Amino acid sequence: MTSRILKNSLMVISAVAAFSTPVFAQFAATGTTTLSVAVAAESAISVTTGTTSLTEASGAGIFGAPYTGTTNFSYKVRSTKVGGGGSITVKITSDFAAGGPSVATPPTGDAMTYTCTAAASATACTGSVTASTASATTVATFATDAHSTAGTASSDSGSVVWTLPNDPVYKTGTYTATATFTISAT
């Protein structure tokens, strides 16, 4: 019986040895690996004008010109090469205080508007766009397979030029509102 157990054990050991690769055979002077990366659509924005002062053009005369100011921004974008796209939008998330101008309920003819610029990676808004507290409005759009400037330290830029009518109905004082920019890419 001991001889039969020994014989069976030797057969199992022989079978395992025949179908096994010795551990030392996996070592060589070189080795390789396959590197894989899934590059997805991404976007990011930085508003580079912390406070946008809306001012009346000098020499315009009394109530002769609207208040205007420019907000600059930088962005990075990569949209999907088939069926992708995206946008930069802005929404007035905090309106001016009572007594001053209003984006939500402006006096007749006093809507705050803006025009846009954007780099070649985007299409800027066309014409004058009315700012809104109710919904985001478009600043720029991205087409399929859009890419901002190459390089991790590089970005594209754009701007929004705000126009606010200079209405004598506004009470004197300093008024602030918050414009929130959002970027997206698919």
Image: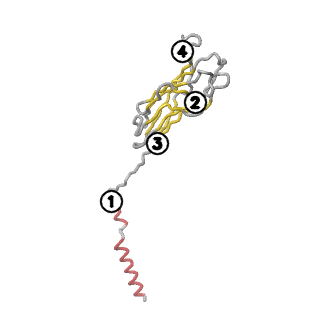
Image x and y of residue 152, in percent = 43, 37
Indicate the secondary structure of the residue bearing disc 3.
loop
Q: Which mark is residue 132?
A: 2
For the point 41% across and 39% down, the residue is: 144
Amino acid found under the numbered disc labelled 3:
Thr
Badge 4 vs badge 1, beta-carbon distance below 8 Å = no
Q: Around disc 1, counting alpha carbons within 10 Å, would you say few (fewer than 14), some (14 to 19), or many (20 or more)?
A: few
Q: Around disc 2, counting alpha carbons within 10 Å, would you say few (fewer than 14), some (14 to 19), or many (20 or more)?
A: many
Q: What residue is disc 3 on?
A: 186
Circle nearer the N terminus (2, 3): 2
Disc 1 from disc 3: Cα separation: 44 Å
Q: Pick whichever, 7 or 174, lies toward us.
A: 174
Indicate the secondary structure of the residue bearing disc 4.
loop
62 left or right of 126 in image? right
Disc 2 from disc 3: Cα separation: 24 Å
Disc 3 from disc 4: Cα separation: 40 Å
Q: Nearer the viewer, mark 2 or mark 3?
A: 2
Picture quarter with the N terminus: bottom left
Badge 2 vs badge 1, beta-carbon distance below 8 Å = no
Circle nearer the N terminus (4, 1): 1
Indicate the secondary structure of the residue bearing disc 2.
loop
Vertical relation: 108 (above or below) 138:
above
Q: Nearer the viewer, mark 4 or mark 2?
A: 2
Q: What residue is disc 1 on?
A: 28
Quarter holding residue 61 = top right
Vertical relation: 101 (above or below) 150:
above
Q: Residue furthest left?
A: 29
Amino acid found under the numbered disc labelled 2:
Ser
